[in-house]
Amino acid sequence: MVRFARLLQRLAEPPGRCAVCGAWPAQPLCDGCRARFAGPRHRCERCALPLPAGVRTCGACVREPPPLDACFAAVDYAFPWSGLVGRFKFQGEPGWAATLARYMGGIAGVDQELACADAVLPMPLAPARLAERGFNQAWLLARQLAGPKSDAHLLLRLRETGSQAALDRAARQRNVEGAFGVEPLRANELRGRRLVLVDDVMTSGASLHAAARALRQAGAARVSAVVLARTSL
Protein backbone atom coordinates (compact mmCIF):
# COMPACT_ATOMS: atom_id res chain seq x y z
CA MET A 1 0.00 0.00 0.00
CA VAL A 2 2.84 2.41 0.78
CA ARG A 3 4.41 1.78 -2.63
CA PHE A 4 1.05 2.32 -4.35
CA ALA A 5 0.48 5.59 -2.49
CA ARG A 6 3.92 6.85 -3.54
CA LEU A 7 3.19 5.90 -7.14
CA LEU A 8 -0.06 7.88 -7.10
CA GLN A 9 1.75 10.87 -5.67
CA ARG A 10 4.40 10.75 -8.38
CA LEU A 11 1.74 10.45 -11.06
CA ALA A 12 0.26 13.72 -9.84
CA GLU A 13 3.53 15.59 -9.35
CA PRO A 14 5.71 16.18 -12.43
CA PRO A 15 9.22 17.56 -11.95
CA GLY A 16 9.24 21.02 -10.36
CA ARG A 17 11.82 22.71 -12.65
CA CYS A 18 13.53 22.10 -15.96
CA ALA A 19 15.12 18.67 -15.67
CA VAL A 20 17.87 19.56 -18.16
CA CYS A 21 19.15 23.03 -17.24
CA GLY A 22 17.44 23.54 -13.88
CA ALA A 23 15.70 26.75 -14.92
CA TRP A 24 12.59 28.16 -13.27
CA PRO A 25 9.60 28.62 -13.49
CA ALA A 26 8.34 25.20 -12.62
CA GLN A 27 7.97 23.06 -15.73
CA PRO A 28 9.52 19.73 -16.70
CA LEU A 29 11.40 21.23 -19.68
CA CYS A 30 11.91 24.95 -20.12
CA ASP A 31 11.22 26.77 -23.38
CA GLY A 32 14.93 26.99 -24.19
CA CYS A 33 15.53 23.26 -23.78
CA ARG A 34 12.43 22.43 -25.78
CA ALA A 35 13.65 24.59 -28.64
CA ARG A 36 17.16 23.11 -28.44
CA PHE A 37 16.38 19.43 -28.01
CA ALA A 38 12.84 18.85 -29.31
CA GLY A 39 12.89 20.50 -32.72
CA PRO A 40 11.09 18.63 -35.53
CA ARG A 41 13.11 16.40 -37.86
CA HIS A 42 12.14 15.00 -41.22
CA ARG A 43 11.88 11.22 -40.89
CA CYS A 44 11.10 8.10 -42.92
CA GLU A 45 7.34 7.67 -42.94
CA ARG A 46 7.66 3.89 -42.36
CA CYS A 47 10.46 3.60 -39.74
CA ALA A 48 11.00 7.16 -38.40
CA LEU A 49 14.75 7.29 -39.09
CA PRO A 50 15.95 10.81 -39.99
CA LEU A 51 16.02 11.57 -43.72
CA PRO A 52 16.95 14.53 -45.92
CA ALA A 53 14.07 16.87 -46.67
CA GLY A 54 11.94 15.72 -49.58
CA VAL A 55 12.66 12.00 -49.15
CA ARG A 56 9.62 10.17 -47.82
CA THR A 57 10.91 6.62 -47.36
CA CYS A 58 14.38 5.26 -46.58
CA GLY A 59 16.07 2.69 -48.80
CA ALA A 60 15.67 -0.13 -46.27
CA CYS A 61 11.90 0.35 -46.13
CA VAL A 62 11.69 0.52 -49.91
CA ARG A 63 13.59 -2.77 -50.27
CA GLU A 64 11.71 -4.51 -47.47
CA PRO A 65 8.51 -2.70 -46.43
CA PRO A 66 7.89 -3.09 -42.69
CA PRO A 67 4.54 -4.26 -41.26
CA LEU A 68 3.88 -0.70 -40.01
CA ASP A 69 1.97 1.52 -42.41
CA ALA A 70 3.40 4.59 -40.69
CA CYS A 71 5.79 5.33 -37.85
CA PHE A 72 6.21 8.59 -35.93
CA ALA A 73 8.95 9.61 -33.51
CA ALA A 74 9.18 12.87 -31.59
CA VAL A 75 12.92 13.02 -30.85
CA ASP A 76 16.21 11.20 -31.26
CA TYR A 77 17.19 8.86 -28.44
CA ALA A 78 20.09 10.99 -27.26
CA PHE A 79 20.78 13.60 -24.60
CA PRO A 80 18.66 14.64 -22.75
CA TRP A 81 15.93 12.19 -23.76
CA SER A 82 17.83 9.00 -22.92
CA GLY A 83 18.24 10.22 -19.35
CA LEU A 84 14.64 11.40 -19.04
CA VAL A 85 13.31 8.10 -20.35
CA GLY A 86 15.51 6.32 -17.81
CA ARG A 87 14.01 8.41 -15.02
CA PHE A 88 10.51 7.75 -16.32
CA LYS A 89 10.92 3.97 -16.62
CA PHE A 90 13.52 2.90 -14.12
CA GLN A 91 13.52 5.47 -11.33
CA GLY A 92 9.82 5.41 -10.52
CA GLU A 93 8.85 8.79 -12.03
CA PRO A 94 5.62 8.07 -13.97
CA GLY A 95 4.66 11.74 -13.69
CA TRP A 96 6.79 12.25 -16.82
CA ALA A 97 4.08 10.58 -18.94
CA ALA A 98 2.05 13.73 -19.54
CA THR A 99 5.05 15.81 -20.59
CA LEU A 100 6.52 13.15 -22.89
CA ALA A 101 3.15 12.38 -24.45
CA ARG A 102 2.74 16.05 -25.38
CA TYR A 103 5.84 15.82 -27.56
CA MET A 104 4.50 12.65 -29.16
CA GLY A 105 1.11 14.22 -29.82
CA GLY A 106 2.78 17.25 -31.39
CA ILE A 107 4.44 15.28 -34.21
CA ALA A 108 3.09 16.34 -37.59
CA GLY A 109 0.40 13.89 -38.68
CA VAL A 110 -0.05 12.16 -35.32
CA ASP A 111 -3.24 14.02 -34.44
CA GLN A 112 -4.87 12.76 -37.64
CA GLU A 113 -3.53 9.23 -37.11
CA LEU A 114 -5.02 9.13 -33.60
CA ALA A 115 -8.31 10.66 -34.72
CA CYS A 116 -8.75 7.98 -37.40
CA ALA A 117 -7.68 5.09 -35.15
CA ASP A 118 -10.21 2.63 -33.77
CA ALA A 119 -7.91 1.78 -30.87
CA VAL A 120 -4.53 2.83 -29.48
CA LEU A 121 -2.54 -0.05 -28.02
CA PRO A 122 0.46 0.21 -25.68
CA MET A 123 3.26 -2.26 -26.17
CA PRO A 124 2.72 -4.78 -23.35
CA LEU A 125 5.27 -5.70 -20.70
CA ALA A 126 5.91 -9.22 -19.47
CA PRO A 127 4.27 -9.83 -16.07
CA ALA A 128 7.61 -10.07 -14.24
CA ARG A 129 8.82 -6.77 -15.73
CA LEU A 130 5.50 -5.10 -14.93
CA ALA A 131 5.64 -6.30 -11.32
CA GLU A 132 9.22 -5.06 -10.98
CA ARG A 133 8.55 -1.62 -12.46
CA GLY A 134 5.06 -1.09 -11.03
CA PHE A 135 3.64 0.37 -14.25
CA ASN A 136 3.83 0.00 -18.01
CA GLN A 137 5.30 3.22 -19.39
CA ALA A 138 3.75 2.60 -22.83
CA TRP A 139 0.29 2.36 -21.25
CA LEU A 140 0.75 5.66 -19.42
CA LEU A 141 1.81 7.33 -22.68
CA ALA A 142 -1.07 5.78 -24.65
CA ARG A 143 -3.59 6.91 -22.06
CA GLN A 144 -2.26 10.47 -22.22
CA LEU A 145 -2.32 10.43 -26.03
CA ALA A 146 -5.65 8.79 -26.70
CA GLY A 147 -7.76 8.73 -23.53
CA PRO A 148 -10.67 6.30 -23.93
CA LYS A 149 -9.31 4.96 -27.23
CA SER A 150 -6.34 3.43 -25.41
CA ASP A 151 -6.69 -0.27 -24.65
CA ALA A 152 -4.14 -2.15 -22.56
CA HIS A 153 -5.85 -5.55 -22.76
CA LEU A 154 -6.15 -6.28 -26.48
CA LEU A 155 -2.48 -6.85 -27.37
CA LEU A 156 -0.75 -9.43 -25.18
CA ARG A 157 2.84 -10.34 -24.53
CA LEU A 158 2.94 -14.13 -24.75
CA ARG A 159 6.43 -14.70 -23.41
CA GLU A 160 9.37 -12.90 -21.84
CA THR A 161 12.05 -12.03 -24.36
CA GLY A 162 14.72 -10.62 -22.06
CA SER A 163 16.88 -7.62 -22.81
CA GLN A 164 17.63 -6.89 -26.45
CA ALA A 165 20.34 -4.32 -25.78
CA ALA A 166 23.27 -6.59 -26.64
CA LEU A 167 21.66 -8.19 -29.72
CA ASP A 168 22.16 -7.23 -33.34
CA ARG A 169 19.22 -6.53 -35.62
CA ALA A 170 18.76 -10.10 -36.84
CA ALA A 171 19.00 -11.50 -33.32
CA ARG A 172 16.44 -8.98 -32.07
CA GLN A 173 14.01 -10.12 -34.73
CA ARG A 174 14.46 -13.77 -33.80
CA ASN A 175 14.17 -12.95 -30.11
CA VAL A 176 10.69 -11.39 -30.43
CA GLU A 177 9.26 -13.81 -32.98
CA GLY A 178 5.92 -15.02 -31.65
CA ALA A 179 6.24 -12.89 -28.52
CA PHE A 180 2.94 -11.04 -29.07
CA GLY A 181 -0.62 -12.08 -29.65
CA VAL A 182 -4.19 -10.87 -29.46
CA GLU A 183 -6.65 -11.54 -26.65
CA PRO A 184 -8.51 -14.57 -28.09
CA LEU A 185 -11.95 -13.52 -26.87
CA ARG A 186 -11.59 -10.16 -28.59
CA ALA A 187 -9.82 -11.13 -31.80
CA ASN A 188 -12.95 -10.44 -33.87
CA GLU A 189 -12.73 -6.77 -32.83
CA LEU A 190 -9.64 -6.29 -34.98
CA ARG A 191 -10.97 -7.22 -38.40
CA GLY A 192 -10.79 -4.20 -40.65
CA ARG A 193 -9.70 -1.89 -37.81
CA ARG A 194 -7.14 0.91 -37.77
CA LEU A 195 -4.73 0.57 -34.85
CA VAL A 196 -1.92 2.65 -33.38
CA LEU A 197 0.87 1.11 -31.31
CA VAL A 198 2.55 3.24 -28.63
CA ASP A 199 5.98 2.81 -27.03
CA ASP A 200 8.61 5.00 -25.43
CA VAL A 201 11.68 4.06 -27.50
CA MET A 202 12.15 2.40 -30.87
CA THR A 203 15.54 0.82 -31.55
CA SER A 204 15.58 -1.70 -34.40
CA GLY A 205 11.79 -1.85 -34.54
CA ALA A 206 11.80 -5.61 -33.97
CA SER A 207 9.28 -5.55 -31.11
CA LEU A 208 6.92 -3.10 -32.82
CA HIS A 209 7.10 -5.10 -36.03
CA ALA A 210 6.36 -8.36 -34.22
CA ALA A 211 3.35 -6.77 -32.55
CA ALA A 212 2.17 -5.29 -35.86
CA ARG A 213 2.39 -8.70 -37.55
CA ALA A 214 0.26 -10.24 -34.80
CA LEU A 215 -2.37 -7.53 -35.27
CA ARG A 216 -2.34 -7.96 -39.04
CA GLN A 217 -2.76 -11.70 -38.71
CA ALA A 218 -5.89 -10.97 -36.68
CA GLY A 219 -7.27 -8.88 -39.55
CA ALA A 220 -6.26 -5.30 -38.77
CA ALA A 221 -6.52 -3.07 -41.84
CA ARG A 222 -3.89 -0.53 -40.78
CA VAL A 223 -1.22 -0.55 -38.07
CA SER A 224 0.94 2.46 -37.28
CA ALA A 225 3.21 3.35 -34.38
CA VAL A 226 3.97 6.45 -32.31
CA VAL A 227 7.07 6.54 -30.11
CA LEU A 228 8.76 9.24 -28.10
CA ALA A 229 12.34 8.54 -29.17
CA ARG A 230 14.05 6.79 -32.08
CA THR A 231 17.61 5.50 -31.95
CA SER A 232 19.89 5.97 -34.93
CA LEU A 233 20.68 2.19 -35.07
Image (cartoon, grey):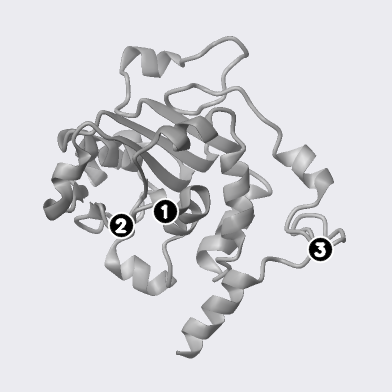
| Disc nearest the viewer among 3 and 2 | 3
Q: Amino acid at mark 2?
A: Gly
Name the residue type under label 3: Ala
In the image: residue 194, left or right of residue 199: left
Instruction: Confirm or deny contact between disc 3 and disc 2 (CB under 8 A).
Output: no
Give how far apart the Cα atoms at labels 3 and 2 are. 38 Å
- Cα distance between the residues tagged 2 and 1: 31 Å
Is 178 above or below relative to 67? below
* Residue 77 spot, x, y in % from top left: 58, 42
Residue located 41% across and 62% down the image: 136
The residue that disc 3 covers is 26
Residue at the spot of label 1: 148
Residue denoted by label 2? 162
- The earlier-in-sequence mark between 3 and 1 is 3
Quarter residue 126 falls in: bottom left
* Left/right of residue 112 with respect to residue 53 in the rendered view: left
Q: Is residue 180 above or below residue 132?
A: above
Residue 134 percent across, percent down from the top left: 42, 72
Inspect the image, locate mark 1, and give the three-letter code of the amino acid beneath it.
Pro
Q: Secondary structure at mark 3?
A: loop
Side (left or right) of 129 relative to 13: left
Taking the spot 64% from the left edge, 54% from the top edge, the residue there is: 99
**Can residue 147 be seen?**
yes
Among the two numbered marks 2 and 1 on one chain, the one whose residue lies closer to the N terminus: 1
At horizontal 61% and vertical 14% (from top left) the residue drawn is: 52
**Residue 232 appears anywhere in the view:** no
- The residue at the far bottom in this view is 2
Name of the residue lying farthest toward the top: 54
Q: Residue at x 35, y 73 (%)?
A: 131
* SS at badge 1: helix
Tell whether 150 sits left or right of 162.
Answer: right
Quadrant where the image shows the N terminus: bottom left
